[in-house]
Image: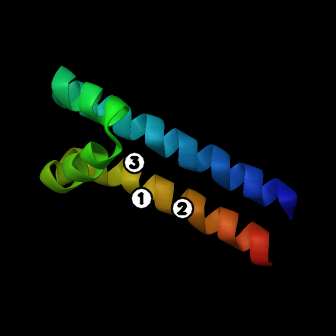
Amino acid sequence: MEVLVYLGLFVFVIGGIGTLIAAFKTSVWWGLGCVVIAPVSLLFLIMNWGVAKNPFFLQLVGVGIMLFGRYA
């Protein structure tokens, strides 16, 4: 089941990259803030739910796959 953990991590990272892409598409300042200061990503998610929800759900799927691979 170790393969599922790595697969989940891969999906999680892809979701994080998607969040960064959405932040940079919104504004360079949002993108830089998300890269430099971690809580800004959460603020970006709340304030720009329409563009940030899909990468966020992709990250949740990645966490779910990792947990399933770890405990199954």
Outermost residue, bottom side: 72
Residue 63 to residue 42: above or below = below
Residue under label 1: 57
Q: Residue at x 77, y 70 (%)?
A: 70
Colour scheme in use = rainbow
Q: Is residue 54 left or right of residue 5?
A: left
- Kindly identify the amino acid type of the residue bearing the numbered disc 3: Pro
- Kindly identify the amino acid type of the residue bearing the numbered disc 2: Val
Q: Are marks 2 and 1 in contact (CB under 8 Å)?
A: yes
Q: Residue at x 47, y 54 (%)?
A: 58
Q: Are marks 3 and 1 in contact (CB under 8 Å)?
A: yes
Q: Position of residue 53 (x, y in %)?
A: 30, 54
Q: Is residue 40 left or right of residue 68?
A: left
Q: Quadrant of residue 20?
A: top left
Q: Position of residue 64 (x, y in %)?
A: 59, 68
Q: Residues within 10 Å of mark 1 (few under 14, many from 20)?
A: few
Q: Nearer the viewer, residue 24 or 36?
A: 36
Outermost residue, front side: 37
Q: CA distance from mark 2 to mark 1?
A: 6 Å
> Upstream in the sequence, badge 2 or badge 3?
3
Q: Position of residue 28 (x, y in %)?
A: 20, 21
Label 1's element?
helix
Label 3's element?
helix
Residue under label 2: 61
